[in-house]
Amino acid sequence: MARRNVLITGCSSGIGLALAIKMAKDEQERFKVYATMRNLAKKDALEEAAGHNLGKTLEIKQLDVCDEQSIKTCVNSIPDRRIDVLVSNAGMGLIGPIECQTIDEMKTVMDTNFFGLVRLLKEILPDMKKRKSGHIVIISSVMGIQGILFNDVYAASKFAVEGFCESLAIQALKFKLQLSLIEPGPVVTEFERKVFEDGMKMDLSAADEETADMFTNIYLKNYKQIFQSLGQSAEEVAEHTVKIILAENPPFRHQTNTLYTPMTTLKYADPNGDLPIDIFYKMSPLFIHQGPVLHQGCLLPSFTSFPDVSPAWD
Ligand code: NAD
């Protein structure tokens, strides 16, 4: 089998870095990895991890998903512009009450997480269509299926990605292209650290007292613990992603953390949409009011304490 060219975005840290290294070190040398990042000054960790694979099965290139010219320049630098597997991984988070976020901050999240993918595909999809081959892999999130408290804009950006891909997947069939959405739950990376730090620094003066208190004393207070107890490592998510890339018939959706499957199943179980919202509310301290035990459900429900619920149609 010919070696497949793989382009991955956002490889200076986290899932992108772990995936680039895992694929570059593949024992059967099935991949040539173009590991891209916005800022090449941040390439040290990737270079070090790549070791002797650098320049052989792994090349580092500049690519900013918010800059069309940088995408074009990167793709043009690849022999025959041939990308067999595109992994759209670059992304960013945003948490907090919307009344404390600026529209510009929200636009940056949409521009990176959603339009970043669109820009990549505008450049890469036509070549894949011509060749009638290619696999587009997108690092989405379980929040692309179900929104979570204080993640309104981030969830919206991942919903946009999922809707876009659902539409595109139908067309892709005609061209024999494959599309896969990887949907992790919490993953312990820079993402988590940065989002938490930004949340801690957030100016909450535009929010009412109750909202500010919910965000600080419930959401942020439990944030670290959720990631520590339920979070996966970037390497685990990379392992799942490689399995999907190597699958003969890759699925359209793949969740990496089974603890979160009930969360998305609830969504599909009730066409009215009330079931997941009601359950998340009841699992959270918003419902329990000042009770001594802080349930973690309001963050990223793990369903370890799944409440007794009857489906809406019972
Ligand atoms: P991370 O912060 O370590 O990695 C994100 C990478 O994207 C960084 O290297 C960053 O520099 C890069 N990036 C940001 N803007 C960019 C731009 N304009 N152009 C190019 N690169 C850019 O975090 P991560 O957890 O590895 O995130 C990777 C993906 O996984 C993201 O799409 C994120 O939404 C998704 N995800 C993360 C989690 C989590 O809990 N960490 C959960 C579900 C999904």
Image (cartoon, rainbow, N blue to C red):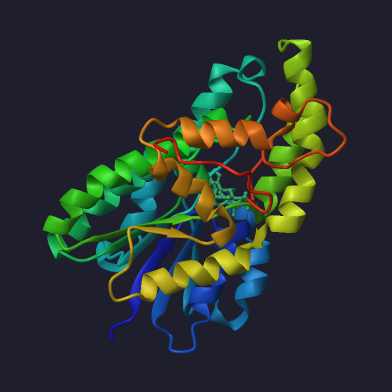
Relative to 201, residue 86 above or below: below
| Residue closer to the observer: 199 or 313 | 313
Q: Which of 196/269 is in front? A: 269
Closer to the camera, 291 or 190?
Answer: 291
Name which residue lies at 48% across and 80% down.
56
Q: Residue 196's image quarter?
A: top right
Q: Quadrant of residue 117?
A: top left
Q: Position of residue 41 (x, y in %)?
A: 64, 53
- Residue 120 lies, in percent from the top left, at 35, 47
Res 116 seen here: no
Q: Position of residue 7 (x, y in %)?
A: 40, 62
Q: Is residue 226 left or right of residue 165?
A: right
Give the left or right position of residue 124, taking residue 273 as reference: left
Q: Quadrant of the N terminus?
A: bottom left
Give the quadrant of residue 94.
Answer: top right
Q: 205 left or right of 84? A: right
156 vs 70, nearest the viewer: 156
Total numbered labels placed on residues in the image? 0
Q: In the orientation shown, which residue stands out farthest toward the bottom?
A: 28
Q: Residue 271 vs residue 15: left or right?
A: left
**Where does residue 88 sit, x and y in percent of width and height?**
43, 53
Q: Can residue 83 be seen from the camera position used here?
A: yes
Which residue is located at x 61 percent, y 68 percent? 235
- Quadrant showing the C terminus: top left
